[in-house]
Image (spheres, rainbow, N blue to C red):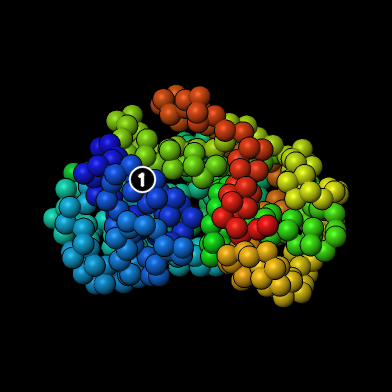
Amino acid sequence: MASGTGDVTVVAGVSGIVGRAVATRLLAEGGTVIGLSRTPPSPAIPGLRHVAVDLAVREACAAALAANAANATAVVFAGRAPNPDPAVEADRNLAMLRHVVEGVEAAGAPLAHVHLVHGCKWYGSHLGAYPTPAEEDDARADVRNFYYDQQDYAVARTGAGAKWSWSALRPHVLTGFSLGYPHNLVGVLAAMGTIRRERGQKLSFPGTENCFFSLTQVTDLGLLVDAILWCMATPAARNEAFNVICADYFRFCDVWHDIADFFEIEPAEVKTQPLGEAMLGADGLWLDLAKREGLIEPDLRRIANWGYGDTNFRIWWDDMASNAKIRRAGFETPDRVITSRSAILGALQAYRDARVIP
């Protein structure tokens, strides 16, 4: 299927960073989007048909989709219900996917494609060192992971004769704009850099030296949306999973000066300190700053999750996946060759343009 006018796409998890970006792009291209989430996206997405529903409740999901999704041609599943117990998380997130897909089917919709938004945790990137650069057919990590369960469900359903195809993408750490989303490293950088400038401090790296000098990668949010729409429209992507990352790898030590320049402060080396400790008292400072500068978000917690930043700034292993498969399938074009540095700085600029930071 091709995205655009006449298509009706159900976006599950529309309030999250990926769901919001996909919905916005599809609407801009003339499509119809039914967005599912417990609370409406904030800020609102013009043109979105939002349906408030808890994806974990089968009956509620079935009723919502019966009333709204009879013409749906595609599902983009970008929802997630985190839980510290991997088994509980896996069971819950598989159930959510089943509720959406089977609810759309029960509504009699002409469903043609289901897209799964996963990530490089597929390779155990959150557990410790793993073979790099990771490739899509690498052995699975020896731990429960809802990515595995969801993809296995899609494979089993299509193998049993479902009329739709599936695809899955595995981005790395996303660089893009969001508010109220707990897993955005650029939000952490945006708030941290602004607070350090306000306090007259240098921009030291709050993580470990090993993280500062190890290889890592990011995925530009716009690039991920491009890849999702490409998967939905491209026969070569049907029933396949792909990594999608920026065109290069980087070390924080090599981009830290550029990040400091963005905030017009002096860069510094590593000063390992939990961000929650380093940013004590910052909530009040931010409230005053927002009033003084006319910023749109006075609640610092909707911009930055310090714990998420600490997790990412303490990864000591090389953290890399291969882009070869998606390139061989034809995704990469000159306008999709995005460097890590430009992705990070572009996302920071998006926070500034939106008046979240001064």
Which residue sits at x=74%, y=71%? Answer: 285
As drawn, is 347 to the left or to the right of 2? right
Closest to the observer, 302 or 85: 302
Horizontal side of 61 relative to 342 (left or right) equals left
- The answer to which image quadrant residue 107 occupies is bottom left
Q: Residues within 10 Å of mark 1 (few under 14, many from 20)?
A: some
Q: Which residue occupies the foreground of this view, 58 or 74? A: 74
Q: Residue at x 47, y 25 (%)?
A: 333
Residue nearest the viewer, comparing 122 with 107 = 107
Q: Residue at x 41, y 62 (%)?
A: 44
Amino acid type at circle 1 is: Ala
The reply, left or right, for residue 279 in relation to residue 83 is right
Q: Quadrant of the N terminus?
A: top left
Image-quadrant location for residue 215: top right
Decide: is 336 above or below 88: above
Q: Position of residue 132 (x, y in %)?
A: 62, 36
Q: Is residue 300 visible?
A: no
Which percent across, then down, holds residue 181? 53, 62
| Disc 1 element | helix
- Quadrant of the image for the C terminus? bottom right
Q: Which residue is mark 1?
A: 28
Up-down relation of residue 156 to residue 69 (above or below): above
305 relative to 236 in the view: left or right: right
Q: Residue at left 33%, top 42%? A: 29
Q: Position of residue 225 (x, y in %)?
A: 44, 43
